[in-house]
Image: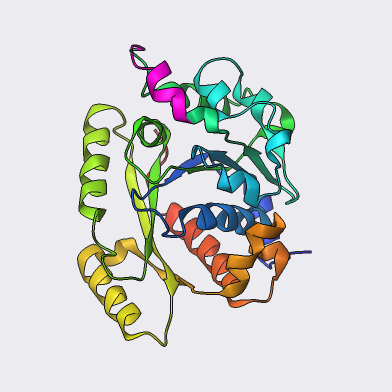
Amino acid sequence: MIADPQAAQASDSPRPLRIIALANQKGGVGKTTTAINLGTALAAIGEHVLIVDLDPQGNASTGLGIDRRQRRLSTYDVLAGEATLAEAVQVTVVPRLSLVPSTMDLLGLEMAMASAPDRAQRLRRALEPLDRGEMPEDQRYTYVLIDCPPSLNLLTLNALAAAHAVLVPLQCEFFALEGLSQLLRTVEQVKGALNPRLAIQGVVLTMFDPRNNLSAQVVADVREFMGDKVYETMIPRNVRVSEAPSHGKPVLLYDLKCAGSQAYLRLASEVIQREGRLPAAA
């Protein structure tokens, strides 16, 4: 069982819905791992969390123990208008954490939606019942985390159009800043054209190895470039974090005491603190 002294405080103080897109067009930066484990950590400290898997690879769904044969309805069905969000939600092994799973059908979404005038707003409209309090009692969330694919395509555009904020996982490796400027420009474009409430929630540094001089240099470079947008919490390179998805579990369930689990609990606390400083959702 995961416990935290902040759980009672989080449970007793209802929070308005916050929708956060986890985005980075570079692959292998720990984006899906962060979505799974940040979601689990938020749930562990009393939040009610929904993860929306927008990556056709479906790794967030697999990492939460949802076998492909169990994915009767998916994010494709929701975006295509063939199912409501409430119908597609599945419970997970983590208390207070639910999931809308992904399937490979998402690969065909861009072509299927090519002529639809609202193609970039499909996810935002699907999530509107959450804002209006029209979901079933057991589907009233305080956080929605959207796991984006590693590209700036229609799926990512839908996530940015629906989100209140963007969280950027950034790997502590050479070329870490490569592509970040493009993502930031995309965020500004979406903010101007589709979603004026969109903000950069923060940058979380992943796969940090204190024994590696390059990791320390990357941290310094990113903090100089992004300033206080970078979280204090860094996610270490940790074998238990890498092992957990093969068991269909978040690392917090696989090994609560490992360095990766403890880092994600700290990150969840920092996210909540930072959310408290953001303007109210539009």
Q: Is residue 131 visible?
A: no
Against 2, is 109 above or below?
Answer: above
Identity of the residue drawn at 58% across and 53% down: 36
Quadrant in which residue 104 is drawn? top right
In the image shown, does 120 or 68 lie closer to the viewer? 68
Whole-percent x, y for residue 114 in the image: 34, 16
Q: Which residues are magenta?
A: 107-116
Identity of the residue drawn at 65% across and 63% down: 244
Identity of the residue drawn at 72% across and 63% down: 253
Against 31, is 240 above or below?
Answer: below
Position of the N terminus by quadrant:
bottom right
In the image shown, does 237 or 272 lie closer to the viewer? 237
Against 74, is 219 above or below?
Answer: below
In the image shown, does 76 or 57 lie closer to the viewer? 57
Quadrant in which residue 227 is drawn? bottom left
5 within the magenta span: no
Q: Is residue 210 left or right of residue 143?
A: left
